[in-house]
Image: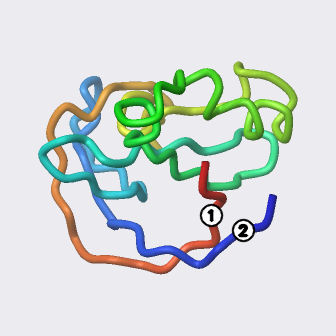
Amino acid sequence: MKAKRLPAALCHANCTKCGLPTEFRMFESGPGGDFSTYIGLSTNNFYRVNLGQIHYLGKSLDQLLLPAVENEGGTMYLTAIPDQIKCKVCGTVFSAERCMVDGEEIVDAFEL
């Protein structure tokens, strides 16, 4: 796998416990949910999963994530964004059901 420079949305959401904002980056998706975002906990790598492969090529999410799982050392080392945001203030892990996009950044990421 080789990382590519890809645009990611710079977002923030308020923690469900302390209410303070936490910033995170994720790959934006259209109405059909084109991409999902994962971050490796052991490497801090970004992974952009092309969900079109599930719908059009019949692949499973587990199949698509396999290279990331192998790179990180197991599924427990992958964080799904925005479903598993860790608050930078209190440490609570929460799902960012609503988030605000503050801009865009270019990140090094692996396409899956």
The residue that appears at 40% across and 39% down in the rendered structure is 51
Q: Quadrant of residue 38?
A: top right
Choose the circle earlier in sequence order: 1 or 2.
Answer: 2
Identity, as a three-letter code, of the amino acid under mark 2: Ala
Q: Quadrant of residue 98?
A: top left
Left or right: 97, with 23 as reference point: left
55 or 2: nearer the eye?
A: 55
Q: Position of residue 49 (x, y in %)?
A: 51, 45
Q: Which mark is residue 85?
A: none
The residue that appears at 38% across and 42% down in the rendered structure is 52
The residue that appears at 73% across and 30% down in the rendered structure is 66
The residue beneath circle 2 is: 3
Q: Is residue 67 above or below residue 83?
A: below
Q: Position of residue 31 (x, y in %)?
A: 12, 45
Q: Secondary structure at mark 1?
A: strand
Q: Residues within 10 Å of mark 2 (few under 14, many from 20)?
A: few
Q: Which mark is residue 109?
A: 1
Task: Identify the image's colour scheme: rainbow, by chain, secondary structure or one colour.
Answer: rainbow
- The reply to whether residue 89 is visible in this rendering is no
Left or right: 106, with 16 as reference point: right
Left or right: 49, with 95 as reference point: right
Q: Secondary structure at mark 2?
A: loop
Q: Position of residue 1 (x, y in %)?
A: 81, 58
CA distance separating discs 1 and 2: 5 Å
The reply to whether dot 1 and dot 2 touch (C-beta < 8 Å) is yes
